[in-house]
Image: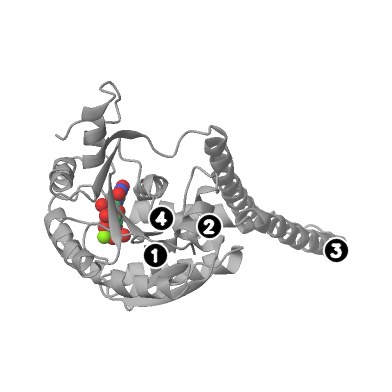
Amino acid sequence: MSQHTTARCISLIVPCFNEEHSLDAFFQRLETIIDELHNYRFEIICVDDGSRDNTLERLCQHAKRNTNIIVLELSRNFGKEAALTAGLDAATGDAVIPIDADLQHPPETIIPMIQQWEQGSDVVLAKRKSRTTDHPLQKFVTQYFYKLHNRISDCEIPRDVGDFRLMDRTVVAALKTLPERRRFMKGLFAWVGFRQSTVEFEVAPRRSGASSFNTRRLWGLAIEGITSFSTAPLSVWTYTGLSVALLSLIYGSWIVIKTLAFGIDVPGYASLLVAVLFLGGIQLMGIGVLGEYIGRIYSESKQRPIYIVRQRYSQASEQAHSASDTNSPKHKEFL
Ligand code: UDP
Ligand code: MG
């Protein structure tokens, strides 16, 4: 870690999607913690991920009041992973901490995180003590998702650890070198490695509103996680095919022997139909899995940007705006 004569800077990244009712309480609690940590400078990068409520206006009001707040407005809803990527790209701090705006990640945890970072950890993971806020079914599925993922992937995702973590700037620089467009952040974080340590926290219930990760979105995220880090679902078809072929060979030989020995038996309509349908199903599943990967190759090959920033709002850019370039679309006045 580099030596600094001035205070070290911590960047907080706050992805916000329809969070207008959480923000006041969030900033209030966060700012109490920041006041305690007066040896550090803070930059709070709030990414408005195409919210449909007044989140952007609220964020801008807070940015007017607090010079540390920078607001990035994305041009539409790109999803949390893209919003985090936007925040990481904009962060300039010596350490970066992504934190949810709904107060499910208690800002108090930032204090032990920074302590561990100062003691030499490059990454400080915030691990959930329990999953009390989760639905039992979600708990069950998540557990098996991690088991399956860690078994078949080339890098292990730590359990009960989300995006809430501290990363040294070297780790962020490493993350930025990963070129993929479809970003499963938990997997990417794990892939880059570095010296890690853990602090524990208790997940709070959502401050207001509802989680935007419904079953369909979580399923999508799980598929993304598996396909981004493992080719096992592809190679499994080679072995399925081999096993089915071997079984058919054995069954075929048995029919030939039986016919030679005992003559022609009943037509076997039912077994024929079952075999055809079964094989049809297996083949379609195989094609489906191929499709998942081809779809990903397709979207990667288009090389579209991960997100688009419509506007950046901060007091610094406002000053820059009044001082110089008036036409720059990046320097807009506050709403
Ligand atoms: N979020 C976002 N874009 C989205 C969905 C969510 O930026 O498309 C943000 C959201 O505002 C919150 C964080 O990501 O700060 C976590 O989202 P949420 O609370 O809905 O998910 P959960 O806590 O259930 O995982
Ligand atoms: Mg949440």
Q: Is residue 11 left or right of residue 222?
A: left
- The span from disc 4 to disc 1 (Cα, nearest Å) is 27 Å
Tell whether label 4 touches label 2 (CB within 8 Å): no
Q: What residue do we see at 37% from left, 76% from top? A: 199
Q: Which residue is mark 3?
A: 257
- For mark 1, what is the residue? 166
Residue 302 in percent (x, y) is at 53, 32
The image quarter in which residue 139 lies? bottom left
The CA span between labels 3 and 1 is: 68 Å
Q: Name the spot of residue 87 as percent of width and height, x first.
A: 36, 48
Mark 3: few/some/many CA within 10 Å (<14, 14-19, 20+): few
Name the quarter where the C terminus is drawn. top left
The tally of labels here is: 4
* Dot placed on the residue nearer the N-terminal end, 3 or 1: 1
Of discs 3 and 2, which sits in the foreground? 2
Q: CA distance from mark 3 to mark 2?
A: 45 Å
The residue depicted at 36 percent of the width and 75 percent of the height is: 115
Disc nearest the viewer among 3 and 4: 4
As drawn, 73 above or below 118 = above
Amino acid carrying mark 4 in the image: Trp
Classify mark 4 as within 8 Å of ligand 1 or not, answering yes or no.
no
How far apart are the two marked residues, 3 and 4, measured between alpha carbons?
Answer: 48 Å
Q: Which residue is mark 2?
A: 226
**Type of residue at label 1?**
Leu
Earlier-in-chain disc, 2 versus 4:
4
Q: Is residue 254 above or below residue 281?
A: below
Q: Which residue is mark 4?
A: 219
Q: Residues within 10 Å of mark 1 (few under 14, many from 20)?
A: many
Task: Report, in whole angstroms, how far the alpha carbon at label 2 lies from the one at label 4.
Answer: 11 Å
Residue 122 in sight here: yes
Crowdedness near tag 4: few (<14), some (14–19) or many (≥20) residues, C-alpha within 10 Å: few
First of labels 4, 1 by sequence position = 1
